[in-house]
Image: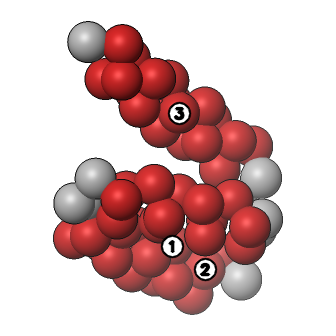
Amino acid sequence: MKSAGIWYETISILAQLREERPEDSNLFSIWETVLTSVGLESLAQASRALIKDLRLIWF
């Protein structure tokens, strides 16, 4: 399925960009939108909670 490959590539690129620019709120919004669009709201929420916790530790 081509659409599965495109989705996987999108998530992979977004994950790499988020790793390179963790403070970029636009990337995080896109990340959440993509995950939510395929029914992965819980992963988007867990990701938001993890980032919040890490910011408390790092900053």
Note whether residue 19 is visible. Answer: no
**Which one is in front in this view, the residue at disc 1 or the one at disc 3?**
3
Q: Quadrant of the N terminus?
A: top left
Q: Which mark is residue 34?
A: none
Distance between the alpha carbons at the discs numbered 1 and 3: 20 Å
- Of 47 and 53, the residue lying toward us: 47
In the image, residue 9 above or below residue 19: above
Residue identified by numbered label 2: 55
Separation of marks 2 and 3 at Cα, in angstroms: 25 Å
Would you identify the image quadrant in which residue 45 lies? bottom left
Query: Toward which corner of the image does residue 4 lie, by quadrant?
Result: top left
The residue carrying pointer 1 sits among few (fewer than 14), some (14 to 19) or many (20 or more) residues within 10 Å by Cα, namely: some
Amino acid type shown at disc 3 = Thr
Q: Nearer the viewer, mark 2 or mark 3?
A: 3
> Where does the image place residue 3, in percent across and percent down from the top left?
36, 23
Q: Nearer the viewer, mark 2 or mark 1?
A: 1
For mark 1, what is the residue? 51
Asked whether, in this view, residue 28 is left or right of residue 10, the answer is right
Where 57 falls versus 3 (above or below)? below
The amino acid type, in three-letter code, at marker 1 is Ile
Pointers 2 and 1 in contact (CB under 8 A)? yes
Query: At which x and y percent is residue 42?
Result: 21, 70
Q: Quadrant of the C terminus?
A: bottom right
Label ID, residue 10: 3
Q: Amino acid at mark 2?
A: Arg
Secondary element at image label 1: helix
In the depicted structure, whether residue 5 falls above or below residue 39: above
Front residue of 35/25: it is 35
